[in-house]
Image (spheres, grey):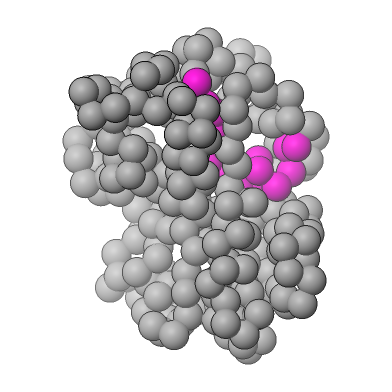
């Protein structure tokens, strides 16, 4: 066993979709989570700024001697390649595993991508899907408001405002016949019930956080880094803004009270 923790970071609450997948699929692993809630969202920032934020996030997690680092952030995974490529530890982003899952799932080779503006503009999903299947057709939509919905806990299936916003974002994907949609920002799986209700059961949703965790599991197993059943995993959370806001919404997203495990981390100027 290697009892060092897995480090996971995101711009805010979105990466908790990956944390939830770790709870379910890697229950013996310890987690250090960093949510940069002071600077959320990342998706509307410049490439230079996103790179700088990613370096800060990575440097913070590396203090904990993590055995694997995960960018549970579609924007960082798409844009901040210069930062993530320098990580010494095994690294997992969300773009490649999500695209692999989508290419396997699609029946008509028409794939939709919902992501942030930075991710869509980077072309990362288009390039990766084209590499995996040159015949696949990709339609991407930038969905900046969805990050705000999650960060403000507007995720209830009965919230008609959220459903209307999501429906408008989805229309171009449905018009182009997408039978598989990548939720390319880890905030978006928290809205999956609403998204599924709009697109119907005939469309497959790809949870980017879950797919990243499946890739992490593979890496841990292949490198002999996974903990066995004798170790019960724990989770510690760090945020760059008020812990109360994060803890309250996280309880809804994770289904458990984590307030005693959340610590404020002031970022250097």
x, y (%) of residue 118?
72, 51
Position of 53 relative to 80 (above/below): above
Q: Which residues are magenta?
A: 67-81
Q: Residue, x 55% and y 62% (percent of image)?
A: 101
Q: Residue, x 33% and y 38% (percent of image)?
A: 26
Q: Quadrant of the N terminus?
A: top left
Q: Residue, x 77% and y 65% (percent of image)?
A: 130
x, y (%) of residue 191?
40, 62
x, y (%) of residue 139?
70, 74
Q: Is 162 included in the stretch rendered in magenta? A: no
Q: Residue, x 46% and y 25% (percent of image)?
A: 224
In-image side of 193 versus 40 (left or right): left
x, y (%) of residue 76?
65, 40
Seen from the viewer's position, the closer of residues 198 and 101 is: 101
Confirm whether residue 107 shows in the render.
yes
Seen from the viewer's position, the closer of residues 38 and 80 is: 80
Confirm whether residue 126 shows in the render.
no
In-image side of 111 versus 227 (left or right): right
Q: Quadrant of the C terminus?
A: top right
In-image side of 44 versus 227 (left or right): right
Position of 244 relative to 62 (above/below): below
Q: Is 77 included in the stretch rendered in magenta? A: yes
């Amino acid at each position: 066993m290697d009892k060092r923790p897995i480090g996971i970071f995101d711009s805010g609450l979105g990466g908790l979709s990956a944390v939830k997948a770790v709870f379910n699929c890697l229950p013996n692993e310890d987690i250090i989570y960093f949510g940069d809630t002071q600077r959320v969202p990342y998706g509307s920032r410049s490439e230079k700024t996103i790179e700088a934020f990613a370096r800060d996030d990575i440097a913070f997690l590396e203090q904990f001697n993590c055995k694997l680092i995960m960018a549970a952030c579609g924007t960082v995974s798409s844009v901040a390649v210069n930062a993530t490529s320098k990580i010494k530890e095994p690294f997992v982003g969300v773009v490649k595993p999500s695209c692999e899952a989508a290419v396997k799932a699609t029946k008509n080779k028409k794939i939709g991508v919902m992501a942030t503006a930075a991710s869509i503009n980077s072309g990362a999903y288009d390039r990766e899907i084209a590499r995996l299947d040159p015949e696949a057709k990709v339609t991407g939509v930038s969905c900046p408001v969805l990050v705000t919905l999650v960060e403000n806990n507007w995720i209830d299936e009965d919230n008609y405002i959220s459903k209307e916003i999501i429906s408008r974002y989805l229309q171009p994907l449905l018009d182009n016949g997408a039978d598989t949609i990548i939720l390319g920002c880890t905030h978006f799986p928290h809205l999956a019930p609403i998204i599924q209700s709009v697109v119907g059961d005939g469309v497959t949703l790809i949870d980017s956080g879950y797919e990243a965790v499946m890739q992490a599991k593979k890496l841990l197993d292949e490198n002999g880094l996974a903990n066995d059943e004798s170790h019960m995993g724990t989770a510690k959370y760090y945020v760059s803004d008020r812990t109360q806001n994060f803890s309250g919404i996280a309880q809804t997203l994770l289904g458990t009270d984590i307030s005693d495990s959340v610590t404020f981390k002031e970022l250097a100027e």
